[in-house]
Amino acid sequence: MKNGATIFLESSWALNALEVGEAQATLCGTLGGTDMRSGLMINGQRHGRHFIETPALEQGGESPNPGVLEVQAFYDAILKGRPLVVKPEEALVVTEIFEAVYESGKTGQPVFFD
């Protein structure tokens, strides 16, 4: 990217893997990272020491099921007028990125964005 950052995306609809999971994500940066495989975990360095945090994402004392939270957020947006968690224009950007990945795979060339 223009600022020197690199994005590496790996996506599969069907994957032969021992660890099966849906909607998993790992983000890594120079100052920290996050892993969203089994809940949210954040790691990095603070005061010269490594840390791992698991933010409380609980509702009513129960550990949330991500699928249930996603449906609840959509329900609340439609029927209660609450703001969407993911806005349509944000979903469009993700779709454009995946389309660029497919195009790059077909042509063997990088795809650049403005």
Image (tube, rainbow, N blue to C red):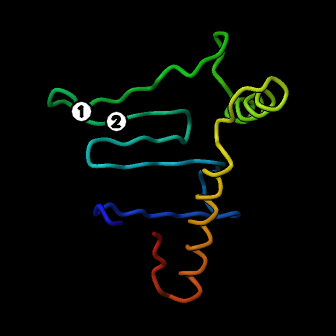
Residue annotated with mark 1 = 50
Most extreme residue toward the bottom is 107
Which of the 4 image quadrants contains residue 69? top right
Crowding at dot 2, Cα within 10 Å, few <14 / some 14-19 / many 20+, comes out as some
Residue 20 place in picture, x, y as percent: 64, 51
Can you say whether 87 is above or below 84 in the image?
below
Q: Residue at x 36, y 63 (%)?
A: 6
Indicate the secondary structure of the residue bearing disc 1: strand
Badges 2 and 1: C-beta atoms under 8 Å apart? Answer: yes
Count the labels in the image: 2
Quadrant of the frame with the N terminus? bottom left
Q: Amino acid at mark 2?
A: Asn
Kindly report the distance in space between the C-alpha atoms of the residues bearing marks 2 and 1.
7 Å
Can you say whether 90 is above or below 85 in the image?
below
Q: Residue at x 31, y 41 (%)?
A: 32
Q: Amino acid at mark 1?
A: His
Q: Earlier in the sequence, mark 2 or mark 1?
A: 2
Q: Toward the viewer: 91 or 53?
A: 91
Residue annotated with mark 2 = 43
Left or right of 51, for residue 63: right
Q: Residue at x 63, y 20 (%)?
A: 63
Residue 14 place in picture, x, y as percent: 70, 64
Q: Toward the viewer: 105 or 61?
A: 105
Most extreme residue toward the top is 61
Q: Residue at x 29, y 29 (%)?
A: 51
Q: Toward the viewer: 96 or 51?
A: 96
Q: Which mark is residue 86?
A: none
Can you say whether 28 is above or below 4 in the image?
above
Residue 108 place in picture, x, y as percent: 50, 88
Quadrant of the frame with the C terminus? bottom left
